[in-house]
Amino acid sequence: MPVDILLDSGGDILVNAAADITPQYSIRQDVKIRLQWFFEEWRVAPEYGVPYFDEVFVKNPNTERIAQIIREEASKVADVTEVKDVNYDEMTRNAVISFTMVTEYGTFTEEVKINV
């Protein structure tokens, strides 16, 4: 029986009862990790990441632009064919981004929380 939760509280991928990692878990994990990278955070590849400080954590953020950024970043993961229904909570200095992605393994709704 597969595990319903993708990552544990430490950010490690969970496996099913048979100690297997199914492809959809790997894809979901890749997208969530990619969305947790801040732009220019990683020295090896500074072009990776989401421009949270430039586009998201600003006064009067452009929610349409944020949705576009999330779609583009998540779509860079192999096997993600579509990202839709991106929602962003602009009421706090924390980003709570929920989105639905379509892969060849199914459609999944995920949430990423970024705290500053």
Image (tube, helix red, strand yellow):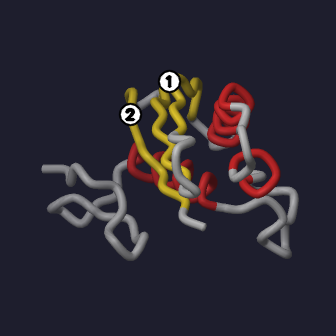
Residue type (three-letter) at the residue carrying disc 1: Asp
Q: Quadrant of the C terminus?
A: bottom right
Image marks 2 and 1: residues in contact by CB distance under 8 Å:
no
Task: Read off the residue under disc 2.
Answer: 108
Point out the frontmost of discs 2 and 1.
1
- Residue at the image position 15 percent from the left and 62 percent from the top: 17
For image coordinates 87% across by 57% down, the residue present is 47
* The quarter of the displayed image where residue 21 is located: bottom left
**Dot 1 alpha-carbon crowd within 10 angstroms: few under 14, some 14 to 19, many 20 or more:** few
Which of 55/35 is in front? 55
Percent coordinates x, y for residue 40 in the rendering: 84, 65
Q: Which residue is mark 1?
A: 85
Q: Secondary structure at mark 2?
A: strand
Identify which residue is drawn at 71% across, 38% down: 61
Measure the alpha-carbon separation of dots 2 and 1.
11 Å
Badge 2 or badge 1: first in the primary sequence: 1
